Amino acid sequence: MAARKRAERVKPKTPGSFTVEEVVELATRHNLAELEVEAEGTRIRIVRERAPIAPGAVPGGAAVDAERPALPQGVAAAVGHITVEAPMVGTFYRAPAPEAAPFVNEGDLVKEDQILCIIEAMKLMNEIEARVAGRIVKILVENGQPVEYGQPLFLVEPRP
């Protein structure tokens, strides 16, 4: 006698039965920058800092990120150079005070976690640190200039 397997019915989830982890996973899987689920007096809102664009997501198959500012005209990142980008919108400062020496200059060797600059955002001074040890090849922003999220600030040649 053949055993008959019964199909299991899965009860559809209501918005109030989602866990935070499930909502985060859903936002990540569908590449959403923001997702809000509300039901039965419970509200879960997920805001991702930046939803990356998947290659081929642009019509024609070209992977283009229109939001991210490009390198300034006439500056080409050589193969192997790392671009340090602004993690927030604000004002770029090369030194801790107007009369102080800059944190780094072009040609300087930097260590991982060494402070490269400050970005002032909403009256808060945010120290931007090097993610790798290396040499500062080019400083791409002038002191006191406004910067956008993802804007290139420095080109760094990594060193072992």
Image: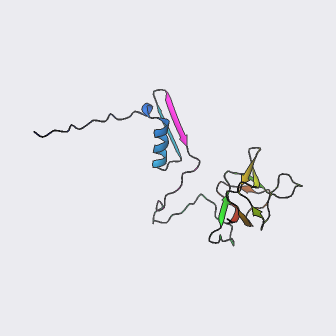
When asked about the image quadrant of residue 83, the answer is bottom right
Image point 80% across, 64% down: which residue?
A: 105
User: Residue 140 at what x, y percent from top left?
Assistant: 73, 64
Magenta region: which residues?
Answer: 41-57
Q: Quadrant of the N terminus?
A: top left
- Please identify the quadrant where the C terminus is shown: bottom right
Is 8 located above or below residue 54 in the figure? Answer: above
Q: Residue furthest front?
A: 160
Report the side of 7 relative to 49 (left or right): left
Image-based side of 17 in relation to 151, left or right: left
Q: Describe residue 143's horizontal placement relative to residue 13 as left or right.
A: right
The residue shown at (49%, 29%) is 42
Compared with 96, 41 (above or below) is: above
The dominant secondary structure in magenta is loop
Across and down, in percent, residue 18 comes to: 44, 34
Magenta run includes residue 42: yes
Query: Residue 138's spot in the image, x, y percent?
Result: 73, 67
Image coordinates of residue 29 in percent, x first then y, are 45, 48
